[in-house]
Amino acid sequence: MANPIARAWRKAFYHDGDRYFMLPRTSSGLPNPSNEGPFGDAGPPVAGWFNRMTYGDRPATPYFYTIIGVWLAALTGLEVWLFTLDDSFGATFVPVMLLLAIAKFITVVAFYMHLRFDKNLLTLVFAAGFIIAIAVFMIMLTVEGQVAPDPQLPS
Amino acid sequence: MAQVAVAHDPHGHVADTNTGISNRKLLMWVFLASDCLFFGSFIATYLVYRNESTIGPYPNEVLDIPVTSISTFVLLMSSLAMVLALNYTQRNRAGLARFWLLSVAALGLVFLGFQVVEFTTFVKEDLTIHRNLFGTTFFILTGFHGLHVFLGVLWLLGMAFAHFKGALTSRSSEDLEIAGLYWHFVDIVWIVIFTVIYLIGFSDGEGLETVGHAASAIGG
């Protein structure tokens, strides 16, 4: 590789098949690399079993996507159940809820939207928009009360 | 000279572009990134004005968590149906692909039905878009999300029509993949709305008396 800029360019824009969820390096010439299963070919034995179970002639089988669906439903059920225990949670309620929402968000984006299997550029594009949105959110919270007048009581 | 990557995506397609990614798919991701800003702004506005309403109804008086949990589950399952429709299209299983595609549209309509019922109930309880800051920020946020769902349903019905006409095959499955990206995005936005507005924000207004309801009670 000629220089770091060119290397970074290739890393961001070309298919390497690595650096995301610890996928091992994969030749871009392979249409369906066998290690593009949900856990690549890395990890403990259970990951290999999971790959064999979910890998077909595509990145993942309908069976795999159904497992993901059950996982999402379970997380939603957990959220609602924890909501009923709100009083016993106290200050940890909001962080726990946000963590569960983040887990669901990442699961959908990574597997259903295929970012887990796709090229890095798409992850970068979406992450850029998301980070800017979070920045807008933080700025609005920071300036709260400074630019928005307090609402007036009805006369 | 620009280097052109001829790369295979996970679905076996070849995109003959500089990035190795289909331009249409890249454009959809750019749109979704911009839509993050759209919804991010509305969610931030809701949170900025959280607990700022001076008159009711307040969230804890009108939000129905059990019902909204069901509609959330419906939308999540529509995402599963969407990814199955795409998967079966790529596998040339036309019958299953059409079934799941129509299921997505049906589940989307069910979700919209839940939203219509919710909005109607709110209006009956004196919560309108003009009533207070909660009403304004809530209806704008969830209303625009509902509009996204509605447009998605129309798009998917068009895709189903193309499927029945034989115009959507494994070779042109990218059309469905792009529609699917939009649909999944609508789903993840709702994941955030459900957690932040419904579950976390439910307790907003506890201990406050609803002026409108109290006045009605006195008047009645």
Image (cartoon, rainbow, N blue to C red):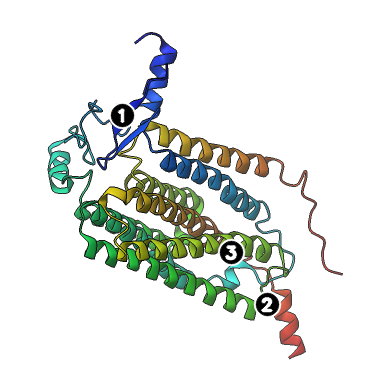
Lower sequence index among marks 3 and 2: 2
Marks 3 & 2, CB-CB < 8 Å contact: no
For badge 2, the amino acid type reads Asp
Report in which chain the residue with disc 3 lies: B
Report in which chain the residue with disc 2 lies: B
Asked if labels 1 and 2 share a chain, the reply is yes
Residue at the limit of the structure toward the top, as seen here = A2
- The alpha-carbon separation of the residues under discs 1 and 2 comes to 59 Å
Rendered location of residue B53, percent (x, y): 71, 63
- Left/right placement of residue A40 relative to residue A8 reads left
Q: Nearer the viewer, residue B100 or B64?
A: B100
Q: Which residue is mark 3?
A: B143
Mark 2 surroundings within 10 Å by alpha-carbon count, few (fewer than 14), some (14 through 19), many (20 or more):
some
Compared with B169, B104 (above or below) is: below
Tell me the quarter of the image containing the N terminus of chain B: top left
- Left/right placement of residue A75 relative to residue B26 reads left
Q: Which residue is mark 1?
A: B6
Where disc 1 sits, the SS reads strand
Rendered location of residue B34, percent (x, y): 55, 43
Q: Residue at x 34, y 68 (%)?
A: B102
Where disc 3 sits, the SS reads helix
- The alpha-carbon separation of the residues under discs 3 and 1 comes to 42 Å
Q: Which residue is mark 2?
A: B126
Lower sequence index among marks 3 and 1: 1
For badge 1, the amino acid type reads Val
Lower sequence index among marks 1 and 2: 1
Report in which chain the residue with disc 1 lies: B
Q: Residue at x 24, y 41 (%)?
A: A38
Asked if labels 3 and 1 share a chain, the reply is yes
